[in-house]
Image: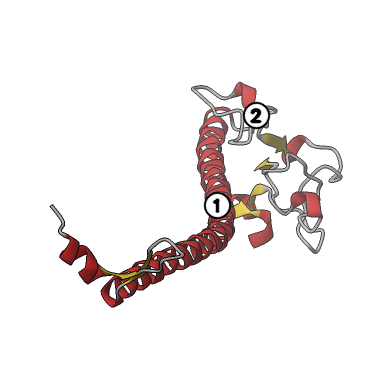
Amino acid sequence: METVKQRQTCYGAIHSHKTKPLLAPCEQGKRESAAFFTKYLQAIYWGRKKARDYRGFTLVELLLTLVIVGTLTTMAANSYNEYKDRSKAAQAKSDILFIESKIEFFYNENLKYPESIDELKGQIPFLDPWGNPYQYLNITTTNGKGKVRKDHNLVPLNSDYDLYSMGKDGKSVSPLTAKASRDDIVRANNGAFVGLASEY
């Protein structure tokens, strides 16, 4: 139990015959109370400051992340679309070369070119990778040159037959210089060239 002497060590008793005793904190108690109060205020201050800093940093980080993710997504989508277009163009070129071999086989057997690729035997890829029919024209039996494919000098691409894909846009006109024809996959120079019209 705490003795009167111990209590007086921590508190100085001030007596008055007119008033009740008053207790004054000792120096050690003052220091401990001040230290505790200071630490308490510091904890509150730094806690609030860190909370503000954390909220601000998270907002900035979120915005930057959204921008970065959006940019990367756009770049990835564009790259993927370009890859798909190149793959489909390569497939169309391969199909045209295959159909060409069937047409040449037909010619060797019949000494004439077919009027339609429907006359060819075997499994023929009638649709290009974009879902449009491959275009074929037997030039040797065509009256006039209005329908044949022409280069930038309006010279016919072939003298035997035209065979091409209308490309990604599914549109095409006779001259290769037309905007609608730039993505066509064409056969030119009687088979010496097969590829994008824009590269011919």
- Residue 67 lies, with reference to residue 191, above or below; the image says below
Q: Is residue 200 visible?
A: no
Q: Quadrant of residue 128?
A: top right
* Left or right: 95 in relation to 16: right
| Residue at 73%, 43% in the rendered image | 169
Most foreground residue, 88 or 70: 70
Q: Secondary structure at mark 1?
A: helix
* Left or right: 147 in relation to 111: right
Q: Label 2 is placed on what type of residue?
A: Pro
| Residue at 60%, 28% in the rendered image | 126
Most foreground residue, 5 or 147: 5
Most foreground residue, 156 or 54: 54
Look at discs 2 and 1 and give the one toward the viewer. 1
Characterize the local packing of mark 2: few (<14), some (14-19) or many (20 or more) Cα atoms within 10 angstroms.
some
- Residue 98 lies, with reference to residue 109, above or below; the image says below
Residue 114's label in the rendered image is 2
Q: Secondary structure at mark 2?
A: loop
Q: Label 1 is placed on what type of residue?
A: Thr
Mark-to-mark CA distance, 2 and 1 = 48 Å
Q: Position of residue 155 (x, y in %)?
A: 78, 58
* Left or right: 104 in relation to 117: left
Q: Please report whichever mark, 2 or 1, sits nearer to the chain's N-terminal start.
A: 1
Residue 184's label in the rendered image is none
Most foreground residue, 56 or 198: 56
Q: Position of residue 106 (x, y in %)?
A: 55, 30
Quarter containing the C terminus: bottom right
Query: In this figure, which residue is indicated by the disc labeled 1?
Result: 73
